Image: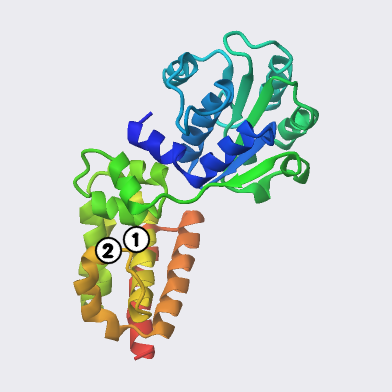
Amino acid sequence: MNERLEQIISSSEEFKILANEFENGNFAKTIMLISKDSDYCLSFAKLLACMILDGGLDNGKLKKSENYIKMSVSSHPDIKIYPLKDKLLVADSSEIVSESSIRPIFAEKKVFIIKNIEQSMEAAQNKLLKTLEEPQNNVYFILTSSNINLLLPTIKSRCNKVELKKLQKEDIISCIEGCEDIKLVTALSEGYLGKARLLSCMPNLGIIFEKVLSVVTKLKSSKQLLSFSKSLLEFASEAEFVFHCLSLIFEDLLYLKGGQELRFEMFREELEKVEGEYSIKAIAMIEKQIDRAVRELSFNCNFTLVLENLLLNILEVKYICR
């Protein structure tokens, strides 16, 4: 695990509260970590598992114990991570129930981490209910979820739910190394480390974004439609990302009009030049058109057709809402 990420997690308000509850004997045996950032959630869960196995913190810091070392190389026999494949199956739940009754091998306690529990089969969730409600004395469960609304109410009611805050820009930057477009990656990540890591590996990220930005700042007439659509069609494999960037840029125009902090501060000058071309009503209508385009893509509509219609709609809305 990235050392900086470890520092961010262990010094976070949520981790400190949980550590304090553990040391004061108020710690729940079943915890649910809630965040859209699956990567961050899993890292948080692993460090929390170490804290549990080590019996708390050492002067407010994680102990660099053998538990910690084994966790770091994914070889701790008493930290079990599920599911074994993409989502939790009934067979996984059966194994968890069985394993939870077996004594720890290395530590005095055992921790089960269940990732993305909301993606599991309903039968798999039901299989865990009794075990989650009445864990063995030396057994703890840490569940992670990006959307608890998809979970069975009976699962939610058995967990102490902890919502993890998004990361600050500085924290994202400190965890991503060797990225040329780090400012853009940070802005697009929306505070989610997992998303930032994916974006940092995306080829031509800067080029794609600049071409999308040019739609907002340079598309003035229908005569330009063919040229602009061609420039974006080469990124058909990243169609959803193209539309997502477009939506965020228009959102920044709203922030600009309201005097709020911009997500894409580095492009403030370009946005200020065209702010007057888009009324608040126009931006709201365009955002709806973008949402519609995204839905059409989800139905496997032709990207070329969807893109050209969207660009034409943007021009029409600008004209109507002048």
In the image, what residue type sits under mark 1? Answer: Cys
Residue with the most extreme top position:
105
Q: Residue at x 40, y 83 (%)?
A: 280
User: Dividing the picture into quarters, in which one does residue 207 lie?
Assistant: bottom left
Residue 74 in the image: state x and y as whole percent.
46, 18
| Residue 120 appears in the figure | no
- On the picture, is 250 further left or further right than 49? left
Q: Are marks 1 and 2 in contact (CB under 8 Å)?
A: yes
- On the picture, is 312 further left or further right than 130? left
Residue 208 in the image: state x and y as whole percent.
25, 56
In the image, what residue type sits under mark 2? Answer: Val
- On the picture, is 202 further left or further right than 116? left
Q: Residue at x 47, y 44 (%)?
A: 12
* Residue sitting nearer the eye, 200 or 32: 32
Quadrant into which the N terminus falls: top left
Residue 246 in the image: state x and y as whole percent.
34, 65
| Residue 67 appears in the figure | yes
Judging by the rendered image, the residue that carries numbered circle 2 is 212
The type of colouring in the image is rainbow
Judging by the rendered image, the residue that carries numbered circle 1 is 245
* Residue sitting nearer the eye, 244 or 185: 185
* Residue sitting nearer the eye, 108 or 225: 108
Q: Residue at x 68, y 22 (%)?
A: 139
Residue 44 in the image: state x and y as whole percent.
49, 35
Quadrant into which the C terminus falls: bottom left
